[in-house]
Image: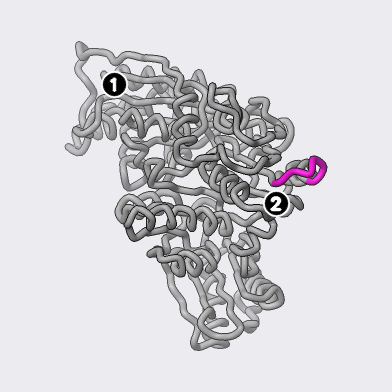
C-alpha cells in the first residue's frame, strides 16, 4: 500500500484518518524516523522517548507500533498511557526526554495524530525536525531506507546487531497534578462552584486529579460539577472543540442552572481551556491572556526581574495595553504555537497567550497548558469577592468580531482588493504583514484594526476585527467581508 506522508505530516504535527492515512505501519515508520532524525542526533539528550495517548480507541495500537519503531533503532521508551497533551509535556520536562503524544486534539473520532517534542518539551515543527522525520519515514515506507542517509544529512539505519531499546511503563498523573498545584496555590480561595465540560476528552482524566482528590492531593475549596467526564473518543455529546460556540451551549446552560461561579471547557487533549462567567457568557481568550499575564507579571516583578509576555497578532489590543502599563515588555508574534514557543524560549518570557485559548508558561517548560491557565483564573476569582463577569470586564474594554472564515478562490486577490480600498479611504492607516495583512487605524479616531490571514490548508481567508465601539466594529467587519467575498470587478469602497 502506498502512503503519502505529506498529507498527514504538516507544519506542526502529524494528523490523519485511521487506518487509511495513519496506520500501525505508518506509526512504526514515524517512530523509527523520529529516533534517527531527532532523538539520536541530540547529544544533550538521553536516547529515550516518553510516549502518551488520549482516549481515542486507536491510541494504544498506534503507541505500540510507534514504540516498536523507536526500540528497533535502539531508543528506550517510557510509556505513560492515558494523558493530556500538557501531561506529556510535563513528563518530557521533568524526565528530560523527547516526547510523543498521540492525539488529534478536537478532530472527529476517525482521526488520530502525533505531537512531537524534544527533551524539555521543546517543540518539533517543520523547521525543527519534522520535515526530516517526514523524509526518513517516507523512505522507510517506500522501502528506500538508505536514501536520506546517502544524502549525508541524516543518520543511517542501525546495524542488524545493534542493541534493541527497552519499553517501560510509568504513571505520571499524580506527579503532574502535584507539579501544577505547586505553581498556583488554590487552598486559600473562597469556596467556588465550577462546572467543567470535558467533552468526553482528557479533561475528564486530569481535572479530578488536579482540582480534586483523585491523585491523593488535599481537597480544595472547589465544588466541581462534571459534564461529560467519561473518556470516549467517539465524542457522543458534542465535539471537543470549545472554540465553536455550539460546543459551549451545554456548559453555559449548566453554569446558570447550577448557579455556579464559572464554567471551564477543555478540548479533546485538554491543552486548551475556555472560560464562561456566572451568567454563562464566554470570557474571551484575550481577557484570560490579560488576567493570567498580569498575575505572572506581578510574580516576576516581585522577584526583581523585568517580565516579558508574548501574544499573537490577533489577540486584543487590551493585552499589550494592560501588560505594558503593568511594567511588562510585550512582544507580538505570528499565530501558531511554534512561533510563540520559540519567542518565549529566546526571550525567557514568563507567559504567552493566543486567541485560540493556548496559554504558555515559562514555569511549565515554555509549553502550553490549559489546566494551569484555568487554575490562575480560579485563583484570581477566588481571591476577591466579585463575580467573574465584573472581573473579566476589566480585561475586555474593546469589541471584537471573533474569527470569521470566508471561502475564496484566490486569497491573495481578495486581500489585495481589501488593502487597495482601505489605503484609498484611509491613507494614514498602518499596514504590516507579520502574518497575513493587518490594517490598523488605532492611532486615530474611530479606533479599529483588522487582520486577514489565508489558511495554509484550505481555500479560506480568516478575518479578525476589533474596535473601541460596537458600531464601528460591525461597519468594518461587514465592509471587509463584502470586499473579500466580492468578485474582483465588483469591489466596493471602504467603511
Dot 2 or dot 1, earlier in sequence:
1
> Does the segment drawn in magenta span residue 259?
yes
Can you tell which mark lies on residue 7? none
Residue 406 vs 374, above or below: the answer is below
Residue found at the very far right of the displayed protein: 257
For mark 1, what is the residue? Answer: 75
Q: In the image, residue 284 lies at what x, y percent?
A: 62, 57
Whether residue 227 can be seen here: yes
The secondary element bearing badge 1 is classed as loop
Q: Residue 301 versus residue 127: which sits nearer the camera? A: 301
Q: x%, y% of residue 36? A: 27, 29
Task: Determine the main secondary structure of the stretch shown in magenta.
Answer: loop
Q: Residue 392 versus residue 447: which sits nearer the camera?
A: 392
Q: Nearer the viewer, residue 462 or 316?
A: 316
Q: Is residue 128 left or right of residue 443?
A: left
- Residue at point 48% right, 24% down? 174
Q: Residue at x 42, y 47 (%)?
A: 361
Say which of 207 and 326 sits in front: 326
**Residue at 46%, 69% in the rendered image:** 325
What span is colored magenta in the figure? 256-261
Between label 2 and label 1, give the one nearer the viewer.
2
The residues bearing labels 2 and 1 have C-alpha atoms spaced at a distance of 47 Å
Label 1 crowd (10 A; few <14 / some 14-19 / many >=20): many
Is residue 111 in view? no
| Residue 164: quadrant of the picture | top left
Q: Is residue 467 magenta?
A: no
Instruction: Please name the residue that numbered disc 2 is placed on.
Output: 277
In percent of width and height, residue 168 lies at 37, 14
Looking at the picture, how far across and down is residue 31, in whole percent?
36, 26
Q: Quadrant of residue 395?
A: bottom right
Residue at the spot 66% in from the left edge and 31% down from the top edge:
200
Amino acid at each position: 500500500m502506498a502512503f503519502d506522508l505529506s498529507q498527514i505530516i504538516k507544519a506542526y504535527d502529524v494528523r490523519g484518518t485511521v487506518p487509511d492515512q495513519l496506520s500501525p505501519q505508518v506509526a512504526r515508520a514515524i517512530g523509527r524516523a523520529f529516533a534517527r532524525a531527532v532523538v539520536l542526533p541530540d547529544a544533550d539528550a538521553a536516547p529515550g522517548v516518553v510516549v502518551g495517548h488520549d482516549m481515542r480507541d486507536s491510541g494504544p495500537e498506534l503507541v505500540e507500533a510507534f514504540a516498536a519503531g523507536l526500540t528497533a533503532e535502539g531508543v528506550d521508551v517510557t510509556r505513560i498511557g492515558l494523558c493530556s497533551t500538557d501531561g506529556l509535556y510535563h513528563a518530557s520536562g521533568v524526565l528530560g526526554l523527547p516526547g510523543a503524544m498521540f492525539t488529534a486534539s478536537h478532530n472527529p473520532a476517525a482521526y488520530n495524530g502525533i505531537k512531537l517534542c524534544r527533551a524539555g518539551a521543546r517543540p518539533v515543527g517543520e523547521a525543527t525536525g519534522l520535515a526530516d522525520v517526514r523524509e526518513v519515514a517516507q523512505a522507510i515506507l517506500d522501502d528506500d531506507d538508505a536514501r536520506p542517509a546517502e544524502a549525508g544529512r541524516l543518520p543511517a539505519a542501525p546495524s542488524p546487531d545493534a542493541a534493541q531499546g527497552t519499553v517501560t511503563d510509568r504513571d505520571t498523573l499524580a506527579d503532574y497534578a502535584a507539579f501544577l498545584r505547586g505553581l498556583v496555590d488554590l487552598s486559600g480561595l473562597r469556596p467556588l462552584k465550577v462546572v467543567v465540560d470535558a467533552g468526553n476528552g482528557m479533561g475528564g482524566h486530569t481535572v479530578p486529579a488536579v482540582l480534586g482528590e483523585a491523585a491523593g492531593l488535599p481537597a480544595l475549596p472547589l465544588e466541581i460539577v462534571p459534564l461529560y467526564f467519561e473518556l470516549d473518543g467517539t465524542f457522543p455529546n458534542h465535539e471537543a472543540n470549545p472554540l465553536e460556540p455550539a460546543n459551549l451551549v451545554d456548559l453555559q446552560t449548566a453554569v446558570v442552572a447550577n448557579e455556579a461561579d464559572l464554567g471551564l471547557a477543555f478540548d479533546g487533549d485538554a491543552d486548551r481551556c475556555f472560560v464562561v462567567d456566572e451568567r454563562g457568557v464566554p470570557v474571551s481568550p484575550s481577557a484570560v491572556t490579560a488576567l493570567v499575564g498580569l498575575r505572572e507579571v506581578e510574580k516576576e516583578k516581585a522577584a526583581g526581574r523585568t517580565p516579558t509576555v508574548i501574544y499573537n497578532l490577533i489577540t486584543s489590543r487590551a493585552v499589550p495595553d494592560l501588560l505594558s502599563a503593568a511594567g511588562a515588555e510585550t512582544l507580538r508574534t505570528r499565530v501558531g504555537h511554534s512561533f510563540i514557543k520559540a519567542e518565549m524560549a529566546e526571550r525567557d518570557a514568563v507567559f504567552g497567550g493566543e486567541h485560540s485559548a493556548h496559554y504558555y508558561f515559562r514555569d511549565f517548560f515554555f509549553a502550553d497548558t490549559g489546566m494551569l491557565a484555568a487554575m490562575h483564573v480560579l485563583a484570581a476569582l477566588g481571591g476577591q469577592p466579585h463575580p467573574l463577569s465584573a472581573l473579566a470586564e476589566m480585561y475586555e474594554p474593546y469589541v471584537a468580531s471573533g474569527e470569521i472564515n470566508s471561502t475564496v478562490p484566490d486569497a491573495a486577490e481578495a486581500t489585495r482588493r481589501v488593502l487597495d480600498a482601505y489605503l484609498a479611504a484611509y491613507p494614514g492607516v498602518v499596514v504590516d504583514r507579520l502574518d497575513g495583512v493587518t490594517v490598523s487605524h488605532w492611532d486615530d479616531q474611530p479606533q479599529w484594526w483588522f487582520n486577514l490571514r489565508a489558511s495554509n490548508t484550505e481555500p479560506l481567508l480568516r478575518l479578525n476585527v476589533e474596535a473601541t465601539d460596537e458600531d464601528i466594529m460591525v461597519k468594518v467587519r461587514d465592509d471587509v467581508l463584502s470586499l473579500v467575498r466580492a468578485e474582483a470587478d465588483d469591489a466596493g469602497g471602504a467603511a
